[in-house]
Amino acid sequence: MSEYLFQVQQVSKSFHVATADVPVLKDINFDVRVGDFLVIFGPSGCGKSTLLHTMLGLEEPTKGKVLFLGKNLYNGVTEDERSDFRKQHAGMVYQQPNWIRSLTVLENVAFPLLLLGEDQPEALKKADQAIAMVEMQEWSSYIPTELSSGQQQRVSLARALVSNPEVIIADEPTGNLDYESGQELMKLLTSLNTKAKKTVVMVTHDLEYLSFSKTAIRMFNGKIVGVFGESDKDALMSEIRGKRGNGFDHNPSNSEGTKEQKQAHDETKS
Ligand SMILES: Nc1ncnc2c1ncn2[C@@H]1O[C@H](COP(=O)(O)OP(=O)(O)OP(=O)(O)O)[C@@H](O)[C@H]1O
Ligand SMILES: [Mg+2]
């Protein structure tokens, strides 16, 4: 297998709004190694979600190319082929999960497999295993909306895992969670990364989650303005602590968190 999950090469993206082209991504270059836990961070509107969409084949760049598992996503590949490729190789988690409200947790988690043509008993068996990975088995027969936000995000992670993808892509997965549930979800993502060997790519504007990353990419105004490996993460964290209020959220970056930090976090979510 390729050493890289993603290779993003000279990617620019503009949106045509009214009579003007508005640049949103500007000459983005980076690779995501197999096994990485990459956190892409930066202030709201800097282009994080747009970047993820280009990486997943959902948004064609205006310039440049994206290789996903070595496949050049926008060169001679139809939208249907991109969609199939994405369903097989990437599991996605969003800030706000979407559920089929007439189905149970188990059936919702099995649903992506049915779309991929798997037969029902096999899909339900794999769904049960994915639910076990996020320790939510006792909630299998609930309707997802009956669960807390934190529990729902664990189930969306199970749904992302059910097709056994190489990479979990998470766009602000903790955005609606309180401090404790956010930390729990991050610990779960970490264990999927280290134990189940899933590559994780997560975007957030919340600095407290940087401590969970192996690699961090800082974006600002459509550009990459910093790449940090495990060896320079400590320097990054102390720089951020020293410069709160620089356009990012003010939330704490200490994963343990004091009582005051938890309170400050939860107040921003309410
Ligand atoms: N389909 C679109 N048409 C026009 N402009 C768009 C479109 N999608 C995104 N944009 C613009 O691109 C910029 C970046 O948006 P994006 O959603 O990628 O930011 P973000 O970093 O994910 O922000 P947030 O942290 O708030 O989710 C914004 O100015 C947004 O208005
Ligand atoms: Mg976004």
Image: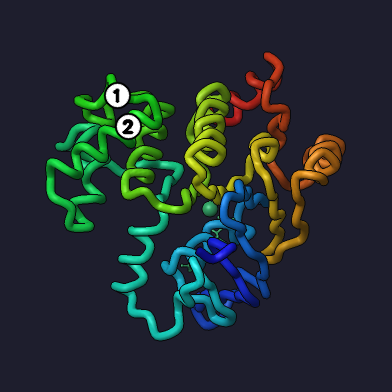
Q: Earlier in the sequence, mark 2 or mark 1?
A: 2
The answer to whether the residues at label 2 and label 1 have Cβ atoms under 8 Å apart is yes
Give the amino acid at mark 2: Ile
Residue 193 horizontal/vertical position (percent) = 54, 41
Q: Nearer the viewer, residue 268 or 62?
A: 62
Residue 21 position by quadrant: bottom right
Q: In this image, 229 relative to 26: left or right?
A: right
Numbered circles on residues, count: 2
Q: Is residue 233 left or right of residue 77?
A: right
Q: Position of residue 64 (x, y in %)?
A: 59, 80
Give amino acid for label 1. Answer: Gln
Q: Which mark is residue 131?
A: 2
Q: Going by the picture, which residue comes out furthest to the bottom?
A: 76
| For residue 37, above or below residue 227 | above
| Of 224 and 81, the residue lying toward us | 81
Where does the image place residue 87, in percent across and percent down from the top left?
Answer: 33, 58
The residue that appears at 66% across and 70% down in the rendered structure is 28
Q: Quadrant of ligand 1?
A: bottom right
Q: At 45% across and 83% down in the image, what residue appears?
A: 75
**Dot 2 alpha-carbon crowd within 10 angstroms: few under 14, some 14 to 19, many 20 or more:** many
Q: Is residue 31 above or below residue 145?
A: below
Residue at (59% x, 46% y) in the render: 204
The residue tagged 1 is 137
